[in-house]
Image: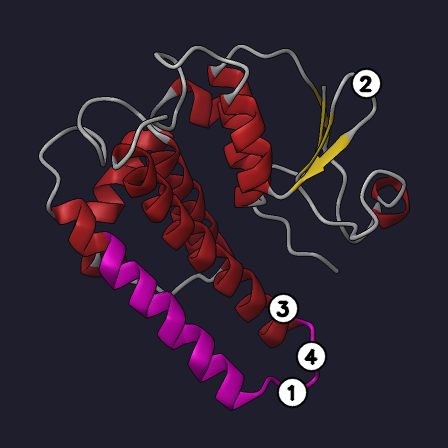
Amino acid sequence: MILIGQYDSPFVRRVGIALTLYKLAFEHRPWSAFADAFRIRPYNPLTRVPTLVLDDGEALIDSAYILDYLDSLVPESVALAPRREPERRRVLKIAALATGLGDKAVNLFYEQRMHNAASDIYVHRLRAQIDGALGVLEAERGKCSGSWFFGDALTHADIAVGCIWSFVMAAHPGLVAAEDYPCLSALSARLEALPVFQLIHQPFIAPT
């Protein structure tokens, strides 16, 4: 398999982490959705990352869709998302909140950095969405007594939250005060100390 995209994207990073934890062999092509759009387009007409190219040439797009496929390749005891309800939807809900937050953080970056004049109305809306998601995630993490969101087993929920938190802090310095979210900050620190998080990592590079 081939994973396309740079690890400073939290969406690419969460896929790279899952592939590594699952011990699935893959080639990483750290192509930029901007500078390398012409390379990505033959695999994904949206020129978005992550894109995962399977051994038979089929290309999968969207991190949630890719992870759902990867989960099907491993035993239930190894999968990072439960296969039974209601545990499955609880994990996926936290992951969806985190990735939705990531989408808003990406949109905020583009709005503020790639337009001559940012829309105050749109920026205010994005910041309210980011703050709202962070508040819910902080509250949910505060209810947890285990090492991770759902006990002592790492799941896609933890990985998504960790990847998105690191992206927000790197792409938007000063936007979020870590002390306002002690539970998320502590979770991120625990995740970033893991060997797989240190391996699947890249400093944030602002697109130009």
**Lower sequence index among marks 4 and 2:** 2
**Residue 202 visible in this rendered orientation of the protein:** no
Q: Which residue lies under the disc numbered 1?
A: 117
**Is 13 on the left-hand or right-hand side of 43?**
left
Q: Is residue 1 left or right of residue 174?
A: right
Q: Nearer the viewer, mark 4 or mark 2?
A: 2
Give me the residue at 19% from left, 22% from top. Answer: 152
As shown in the figure, which amino acid type bears the numbered disc 1? Ala
Q: Quadrant of the N terminus?
A: top right
Q: Nearer the viewer, mark 2 or mark 3?
A: 2
Image marks 4 and 1: residues in contact by CB distance under 8 Å: yes
Marker disc for residue 110: 3
Task: Say what secondary structure mark 3 lies in.
Answer: helix
> Toward which corner of the image does residue 27 lie, by quadrant?
top right
Q: CA distance from mark 4 to mark 1?
A: 5 Å
Kind of residue sitting beneath label 2: Asp
**Residue type at mark 4?**
His
130 or 44: which is nearer to us? 44
Q: Counting other residues with Cα less than 10 Å from the Cα at mark 2, is it few (<14), some (14-19), or many (20 or more)? A: few
Residue at numbered disc 2: 56
Marks 4/3: CA distance? 7 Å
